[in-house]
Image (spheres, rainbow, N blue to C red):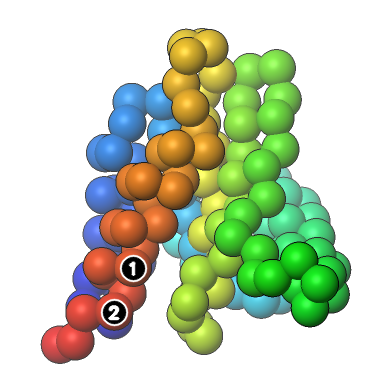
Amino acid sequence: MHSSIEDICEQIIELDKCIRFASFATNAGKEVILLLTLDETQLFFIDSALIMRIREAREPKLCKMICSIVLYEKVTYATILVNSEDHPILMTSFDNKNKRTDHESLILDGILPLLSQCLTRTV
């Protein structure tokens, strides 16, 4: 991987002012970059990793899962599967203050191309 995971997270956060948080996690749900306190993130990461792995069971019929989005009143969370053995899960959060922000487009047109570019470069 050419870009460090810290650099990738910073680049994701810089894509749009509504992106509040970006961090990678392992398959076990352990956070790789600790940007929030352990109390704030531990259960979120374990829950997200477990949900993503459970949903993979549906892939034979529905094709490869791209991400899971959870919408709360104030924040939207997205858990994105990444093509990386070391850091296979990216968690991001979006501020919902601007109701016109299209989180799906940010993921599909911003975050995924950035991940593809950063994770496929050779050193």
| Residue at numbered disc 2 | 120
Report whether residue 50 is seen. no
What residue sits 44% from the left and 37% below the top? 105
* Quadrant location, the C terminus: bottom left
Q: What residue type is labelled 2?
A: Thr
Q: Using the image as rendered, state which of residue 47 and residue 59 is in the foreground.
A: 59
What residue sits 50% from the left and 69% below the top? 82
Label 1 neighbourhood size at 10 Å, few (<14), some (14-19), many (20+)?
Answer: few
What residue sits 26% from the left and 39% below the top? 14
* Quadrant location, the N terminus: bottom left
Label 2 neighbourhood size at 10 Å, few (<14), some (14-19), many (20+)?
Answer: few
Q: Which amino acid does label 1 sit on?
A: Ser
Q: Using the image as rendered, state which of residue 100 and residue 8 is in the foreground.
A: 100
Residue 6 image position (x, y, % from top left) = 32, 61
Question: Viewed as shown, does residue 12 lie left or right of 83?
Answer: left
Q: Distance between the residues labelled 1 and 2?
A: 6 Å
> Is the C-beta separation of discs 1 and 2 under 8 Å?
yes
| Residue at numbered disc 1 | 116
